[in-house]
Structures are given as structure tokens and as C-alpha cells.
Image (cartoon, grey):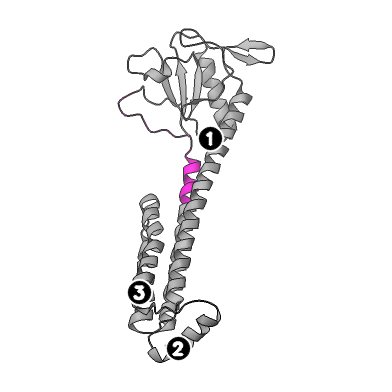
């Protein structure tokens, strides 16, 4: 969550606005940090110059749109039947909480879609690995008769099975590789690669169901471990929601009030 305070240095409400902002952040259990812009400064971005002083933005959005006044005058806020020069602490706190919950919901939606794709990849790899090899021509009439009874044509897919299994294993490993770039832990990737090697070796090299099933179990374990690390990463990001990295070349340093 990026919090910005836009002020005019000559505005008499700047000090009170900082105090209100600090108190609201404490009430919302957010780090007391924000980036402050002097709207009249030459190095301030054009987007902040149309707001009155003081204005508070969250992720670039004016969270209290009821304020009156443009960039050429001090801004006024409604407090019951009165107009005051700074937003109320309660209004700010509620806006911060809503913005934080909205960010969490969006993260949860994205994470849920990523986990669904990862689970689907593991299931496809498991399904391909568990397909029987039709290596014995003497058994083909039995398979053909069984499939004919079900109204399905017989197809000897054995020559394509290693390629199919390898392809689905790669699909299962893809989310692990992608997530490793985010949480910067290679454990699930290494475990997934070992699991894929065991699945292929157990099924096509050693003809061992124990090794193949062990590989599938390791692959599922790598997926669960990756999901847990991603969850930790999201929780850590929520905890740092109010901390702001300095903008490249643009603004006054972030003010800790």
C-alpha cells in the first residue's frame, strides 16, 4: 500500500494533517510512513499539482473524495455540518482498512488462480504417469474388446506415453519455477525436478511402481511446500503494506512523522 500526502508548504493545515495521518495509521495498525509531495515544487509530478492541500492518496487514489478545493487553494473536508481543513481520523482509518482489505482480496484471487493451475499440472502429470503401458501386443485384443464394449476405439498410445508424461511433468514444474522467482527459495523446484526424474525413471526405465508413486508423492509435496512459501510471502507483503520505496529521481524523501 503506497500512501502519499500532498501539501502546499504555505498551507496552515499541513501540521494538523500530518498528525491526523499518523494517528489514523496507528489505529489501522499500519506502519507510520508515507511519501510527501510539495505540490508547488518543480520536481513534483504533474499528477499531484491538481489536488488541494492537504490531500491523501492511497495507491494513487484520493481516498476521501468529499474534499472541497482544487490545487490553487487549501482543501476543506466535511465533518458533520462543518467544513474543516483536515480529514477526520475516523474517516482516514476506515479508508485505510478498506484499501488494505481490498488489496488482500485481490492478492487472494490471484494466488487462488495460481494454485489452481499448479494443482491441475500435478493432476495431469499423475494421470499420465498412471496410464498403463500397452507394451504387450498379446494384450491388445483384450484392451480392444474392453474399449469396444464401452463404445470407444482402441488406440495404442504407448509410443507417445513418455512424451506425454514428460510434457505434463513440465507443466507441473512451471508454477514452481515461476514462484521461486518471487519467494526466492529453490527447495520446491529442486524437489519437483527430483520427483519428475523419479516418475520417468520408475515408469519407463526401471518399471517400478514404487519409485513412480514415490515420485508423484514428492511432486505433490513440492507443490504443497511451494503453496506454503507463497502464503508466507503474501503475509509478509501485507505486514509491510505501508512502507514506501523512494520514487526514482522524483520527490522529496519520505517523511517519517
Please, is residue 172 above or below residue 203 in the view?
above
The residues colored magenta run 232-250
Do callouts 3 and 1 mark residues in contact (Cβ within 8 Å)?
no
Residue 31 within the segment the image draws in magenta:
no
Find residue 160 and name its label: 3
Label 1: state its secondary structure.
loop
* Residue 20: quarter of image: top right
Which residue occupies the foreground of this view, 20 or 61? Answer: 61
Cα distance in 3D space between marks 1 and 2: 70 Å
Residue under label 1:
30
Q: Is residue 183 left or right of residue 98?
A: left
Disc 3 to disc 2, C-alpha distance: 20 Å
The image quarter containing residue 131 is bottom left
Residue at 42% over, 18% down: 48
Q: How many marks?
A: 3
Please give the name of the residue rendered at 44% of the width and 14% of the height, measured from the top-left corner.
50
| Residue occupied by mark 2 | 141
Q: Quadrant of residue 37?
A: top left
Residue 60 in percent (x, y) is at 46, 27
- Which sits earlier in the primary sequence, circle 3 or circle 1? 1
* Numbered circle sitting on residue 118: none
Query: Which callout, 1 or 2, points at the residue further toward the start of the chain?
Result: 1
Amino acid at each position: 500500500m503506497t500512501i502519499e500526502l500532498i501539501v502546499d508548504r504555505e498551507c496552515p493545515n499541513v501540521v494538523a494533517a500530518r498528525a491526523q495521518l499518523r494517528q489514523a495509521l496507528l489505529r489501522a495498525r499500519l506502519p507510520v510512513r508515507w511519501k510527501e509531495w510539495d505540490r508547488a515544487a518543480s520536481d513534483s509530478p504533474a499528477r499531484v499539482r491538481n489536488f488541494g492541500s492537504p490531500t491523501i492518496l492511497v495507491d494513487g487514489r484520493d481516498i476521501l473524495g468529499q474534499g472541497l478545493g482544487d490545487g490553487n487553494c487549501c482543501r476543506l473536508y466535511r465533518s458533520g455540518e462543518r467544513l474543516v481543513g483536515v480529514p477526520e481520523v475516523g474517516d482516514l482509518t476506515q479508508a485505510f482498512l478498506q484499501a488494505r482489505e481490498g488489496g488482500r482480496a485481490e492478492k487472494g484471487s490471484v494466488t487462488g488462480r495460481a494454485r489452481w493451475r499448479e494443482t491441475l499440472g500435478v493432476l495431469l502429470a499423475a494421470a499420465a504417469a498412471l496410464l498403463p503401458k500397452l507394451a504387450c501386443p498379446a494384450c491388445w485384443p483384450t484392451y480392444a474388446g474392453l474399449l469396444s464394449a464401452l463404445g470407444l476405439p482402441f488406440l495404442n498410445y504407448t509410443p507417445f506415453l513418455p512424451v506425454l508424461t514428460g510434457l505434463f511433468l513440465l507443466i507441473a514444474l512451471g508454477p514452481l519455477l515461476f514462484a521461486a522467482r518471487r519467494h526466492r527459495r529453490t527447495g520446491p523446484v529442486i524437489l519437483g525436478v527430483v520427483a519428475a526424474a523419479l516418475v520417468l525413471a520408475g515408469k519407463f526405465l526401471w518399471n517400478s511402481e514404487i519409485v513412480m508413486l514415490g515420485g508423484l508423492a514428492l511432486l505433490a509435496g513440492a507443490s504443497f511446500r511451494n503453496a506454503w512459501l507463497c502464503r508466507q510471502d503474501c503475509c509478509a507483503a501485507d505486514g509491510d503494506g505501508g512502507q514506501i520505496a523512494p520514487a526514482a529521481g522524483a520527490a522529496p524523501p519520505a517523511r517519517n512523522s
